[in-house]
């Protein structure tokens, strides 16, 4: 396969962290608040616990098939043809992921910053940067992620520090008003949005220099990312309340509009949008990387760069097609997305893990 | 018209950037050309408002029966 450098375990942690936050932080508080009302923050906590289980599954899969991408795992477990078919499913999944995330980016910018620009142009601009990054290779992207991390952390700390004075604790009450059920459902949708897409990072895992050490960093990066989303959800509920949170499309953006220190430090939301610049860039890039690298691995291409430009074109075209309008988007995300991502991010990896374990037991039994 | 010309120009730019690097690699060149043709064609189709198939509709067709209902 193509060689495009290796990444260190710390870089893996940084990109897992940013990838987990991704678009999740923009959209998930709204869905959580719609399901669990003022208990949305508990839902996010439950989601982090489910996420721990999901990450355990991925680490186990990584241990059974070390040094293989998702495509390689499928082919090793199921054979060239059946495995290739399943791998194609994952390639399709990362294509859909890249296109939908790019739609989110375009929609966000279109609504909040540049309402008169056609959305396809916003998407094309963003996609140019994504394609450029992926063409330069994994090493460049992970170093970029590392460089972006301090900016992200500064903005995140500013967000927490400036919003804490606005907190209204009574918004959390009554706790567990309608029982534990909605909290668990909210947890599922949190884990589905934040953690199940981590399956597409399997295209990166074989490139990690020291896999034994890296597992710990991988899991902790994802968990810390989840905690950041949890904190934002908590602030949304505490400041905006469950009603406004569930009704707005980008609740965390409505949240930073509330920043107001002594009527002097205010309207800094455009700066704060830098948070989502960084995380959505990383998320789009790794979906795109998974798509491009997976596709060229199935076809046994020597350089995946050969398909980046045409796929970039397709990415922009389909980013305006996948969601015809916002109503379609919200309906699809709240109904179809969860069973779909559960299948592709949980059941299929579980099946692959089972086959891998059986094979290993079989080869040990008959030396 | 201007949109179609724009998309064709983008396609030409992609070919101009990538083809020199692919010289002598037949398989990559074929895959690249086919995908580029497909990309340009779908770009023109979407610029002319030809309804293209939406992959999310396919996913919905498979997974809608397992969904929890839009009402929540």
Image (spheres, grey):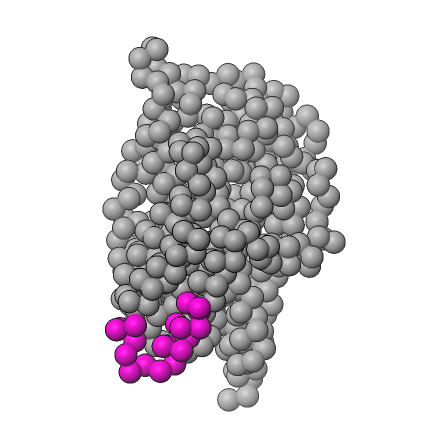
Residue shown at 37%/16% (left/top)? Answer: A260
Q: Give the range drawn in magenta.
A: B19-37
The answer, for residue B42, to whether it is visible in the render is: yes
Which picture quadrant has residue B54? bottom right
Q: In which quarter of the image is the N terminus of chain A?
A: bottom left
In the depicted view, which residue is nearer to us: A323 or A252? Answer: A323
* Left/right of residue A59 with respect to residue B10 in the rendered view: right
* Left/right of residue B63 with respect to residue A108 in the rendered view: right
The answer, for residue A156, to whether it is visible in the render is: no
Q: Position of residue A180 (x, y in %)?
A: 67, 35
Q: Where is residue A193 in the image (x, y as percent from the top left)?
A: 54, 46
Which picture quadrant has residue A68? bottom left
* Left/right of residue A250 with respect to residue A343 in the rendered view: left
Task: Give yes or no for residue B22 being in the magenta stretch.
Answer: yes
Q: Where is residue A324 in the image (x, y as percent from the top left)?
A: 58, 46
Which picture quadrant has residue B29? bottom left
**Residue situated furthest front in the rendering:** B1
């Amino acid at each position: 396969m193509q060689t495009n450098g290796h990444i260190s375990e710390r870089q893996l942690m940084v990109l897992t962290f940013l990838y987990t936050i991704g678009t999740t932080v923009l959209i998930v508080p709204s869905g959580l608040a719609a399901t669990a009302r003022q208990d949305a923050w508990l839902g996010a906590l439950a989601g982090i616990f489910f996420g721990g289980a999901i990450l355990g599954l991925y680490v186990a899969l990584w241990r059974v098939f070390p040094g293989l991408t998702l495509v390689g795992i499928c082919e090793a477990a199921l054979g060239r043809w059946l495995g290739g078919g399943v791998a194609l499913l994952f390639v399709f999944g990362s294509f859909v992921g890249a296109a939908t995330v790019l739609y989110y980016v375009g929609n966000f910018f279109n609504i909040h910053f540049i309402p008169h620009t056609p959305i396809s142009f916003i998407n094309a601009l963003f996609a140019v940067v994504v394609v450029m990054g992926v063409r330069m290779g994994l090493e460049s992207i992970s170093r970029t992620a590392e460089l972006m991390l301090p900016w992200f952390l500064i903005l995140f700390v500013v967000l927490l520090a400036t919003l804490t004075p606005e907190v209204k604790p009574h918004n959390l009450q009554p706790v567990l008003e309608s029982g534990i059920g909605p909290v668990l459902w909210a947890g599922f949708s949190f884990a589905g949005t934040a953690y199940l897409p981590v399956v597409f990072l399997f295209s990166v895992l074989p490139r990690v220099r020291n896999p034994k050490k890296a597992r710990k960093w991988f899991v902790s990066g994802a968990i810390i990312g989840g905690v950041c989303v949890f904190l934002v959800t908590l602030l949304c509920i505490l400041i905006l309340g469950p009603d406004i949170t569930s009704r707005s499309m980008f609740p965390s953006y409505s949240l930073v509009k509330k920043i107001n220190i002594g009527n002097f430090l205010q309207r800094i939301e455009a700066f704060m949008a830098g948070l989502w610049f960084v995380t959505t860039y990383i998320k789009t890039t790794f979906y795109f990387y998974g798509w491009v690298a997976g596709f060229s691995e199935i076809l046994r291409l020597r350089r995946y760069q050969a398909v980046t430009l045409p796929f970039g074109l397709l990415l922009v075209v389909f980013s305006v097609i996948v969601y015809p309008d916002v109503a379609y988007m919200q309906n699809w995300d709240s109904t179809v997305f969860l069973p779909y991502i559960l299948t592709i991010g949980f059941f299929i990896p579980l099946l692959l893990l089972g086959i891998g374990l059986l094979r290993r037991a079989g080869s040990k039994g008959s030396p | 018209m201007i949109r179609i010309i724009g998309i064709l120009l983008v396609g030409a730019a992609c070919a101009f950037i990538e083809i020199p690097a692919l010289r002598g690699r037949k398989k990559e060149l074929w895959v690249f050309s086919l995908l580029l043709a497909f990309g340009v064609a779908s770009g023109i189709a979407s610029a002319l408002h030809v309804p293209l198939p939406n992959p999310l509709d396919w996913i919905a067709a498979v997974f809608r029966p397992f969904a929890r209902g839009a009402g929540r």
